[in-house]
Image: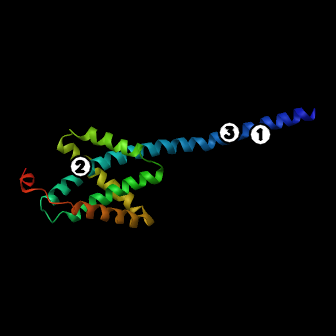
């Protein structure tokens, strides 16, 4: 066989092998991308649902309720666990913020029972994410504490607003 043809045949075999290897590597990556997308959507849905309850607690705190800090910290911590995991998987702003806004808008008119069911499921899922966060738990706790401190440092609502 002519040397150029031998090189060409070897090159073709190499290209086919490389293509097969790329396909083998890409298949799990595509599955991983789909898994990540599903996680991003669930994290957005859960963050929106928990944020609704979080803001209700902030309203109670601004109305003078001094007992909400533990509940507020817990919701904030769980929300940050979910959002942090999505970030580590690759979700970034503005897309992450847009997904949260869309989930918030979608849930706006849900019946209370549906909202409570979602929050209950999300709290359990987010707790698992937090439990598996390992080293990152300190960052989640620190960020949650700072956010809660900021919420609780807000000025109280005027008396006329607090009674509404």
Q: Earlier in the sequence, mark 2 or mark 3?
A: 3
Circle on res. 20 = 3
The Cα–Cα distance between marks 1 and 3, rounded to whole angstroms, is: 10 Å
Q: Position of residue 118 (x, y in %)?
A: 26, 47
Q: Identify which residue is drawn at 44% across, 43% down.
A: 37
Q: Identify which residue is drawn at 27% across, 58% down.
A: 75
Classify residue 80 as left or right of residue 36: left
Residue 119 vertical position relative to residue 19 in the rendered view, above or below: below
Number of other residues with Cα within 10 Å of mark 2, as a class: few under 14, some 14 to 19, many 20 or more:
some
Secondary structure under the numbered disc 3 in the rendered image: helix
Secondary structure under the numbered disc 1 in the rendered image: helix
Find disc 2 in the rendering and name its residue: 52
Residue nearer the viewer, 32 or 152: 152
Circle on res. 14 = 1
Whether residues under marks 2 and 3 lie with C-beta atoms below 8 angstroms apart, the answer is no
Secondary structure under the numbered disc 2 in the rendered image: helix
Q: Position of residue 92 (x, y in %)?
A: 44, 48
């Amino acid at each position: 066989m002519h040397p150029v043809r031998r090189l060409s045949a070897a090159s073709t075999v190499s290209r086919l092998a490389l293509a097969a290897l790329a396909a083998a590597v890409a298949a799990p990556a595509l599955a991983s991308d789909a898994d990540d997308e599903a996680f991003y959507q669930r994290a957005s849905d859960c963050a929106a649902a928990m944020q609704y309850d979080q803001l209700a607690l902030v309203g109670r705190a601004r109305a003078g309720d001094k007992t909400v800090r533990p509940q507020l910290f817990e919701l904030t911590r769980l929300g940050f666990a979910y959002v942090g995991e999505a970030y580590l998987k690759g979700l970034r702003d503005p897309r992450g913020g847009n997904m949260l806004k869309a989930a918030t808008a979608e849930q706006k008119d849900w019946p209370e029972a549906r909202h409570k069911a979602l929050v209950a499921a999300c709290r359990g899922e987010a707790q698992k994410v937090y439990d598996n966060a390992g080293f990152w738990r300190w960052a989640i706790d620190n960020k949650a504490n700072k956010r809660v401190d900021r919420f609780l440092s807000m000025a109280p609502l005027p008396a006329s607003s607090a009674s509404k």
